[in-house]
Image (cartoon, grey):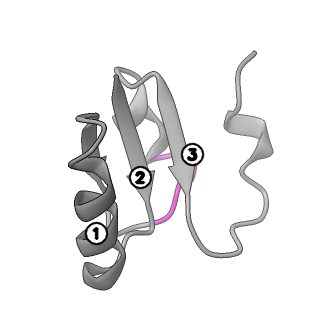
Amino acid sequence: MKIAVYSTKNYDRKYFELINAKYGFDLEFFDFMLNESTARLAEHCEVVCILLMMTGVEKYWKN
């Protein structure tokens, strides 16, 4: 499963990779926020993870 992780800092990535060693997901990290121009980067991912207190991203969610 491919997972896009937005707003990732180096310290976040370290822990995601450590925990993911048990699960083997394909993680794609972005150090910028999810917004209208960056949403397309996750089109090939089955899951999107947003970090921090990101507001206004609901419009990019699909059912």
- Looking at the rendered image, the quarter that the C terminus falls into is top right
Measure the alpha-carbon separation of dots 2 and 3: 16 Å
Q: Residue at x 53, y 49 (%)?
A: 49
Q: Tell me: residue 30, above or below residue 45.
A: below
- Toward the front, the furthest residue is 22
Q: Which of the marked residues, 1 or 2, is nearer the chain's N terminus? A: 2
Which label belongs to residue 5?
A: 2
Q: Which of the marked residues, 2 or 3, is nearer the chain's N terminus? A: 2
- Looking at the rendered image, the quarter that the N terminus falls into is top left
Could you say which quadrant of the image residue 16 lies in?
A: bottom left
Instruction: Decide which of 7, 14 is in the foreground and name it.
Output: 14
Instruction: Decide which of 5, 32 is in the foreground and name it.
Output: 5
Mark in the foreground, 2 or 3: 2
Q: Which of the marked residues, 1 or 3, is nearer the chain's N terminus? A: 1
Residue contact between numbered discs 1 and 2, judged by CB atoms under 8 Å: yes
Amino acid tagged 1: Arg
Measure the alpha-carbon separation of dots 1 and 3: 23 Å
Q: Magenta part of the protein: which range?
A: 33-37
Mark in the foreground, 1 or 3: 1
Where disc 1 sits, the SS reads helix
Q: Residue at x 77, y 38 (%)?
A: 59
Amino acid tagged 2: Val
Residue contact between numbered discs 1 and 3, judged by CB atoms under 8 Å: no
Could you say which quadrant of the image residue 14 lies in?
A: bottom left
- The crowding category of the residue bearing disc 3, from other C-alpha atoms within 10 Å (few below 14, some 14 to 19, many at least 20), is few
- The crowding category of the residue bearing disc 1, from other C-alpha atoms within 10 Å (few below 14, some 14 to 19, many at least 20), is some
Q: Which residue is mark 1?
A: 13
Q: Tell me: residue 12, above or below residue 48.
A: below
Which label belongs to residue 36?
A: 3
Mark in the foreground, 1 or 2: 1
Could you say which quadrant of the image residue 8 lies in?
A: bottom left
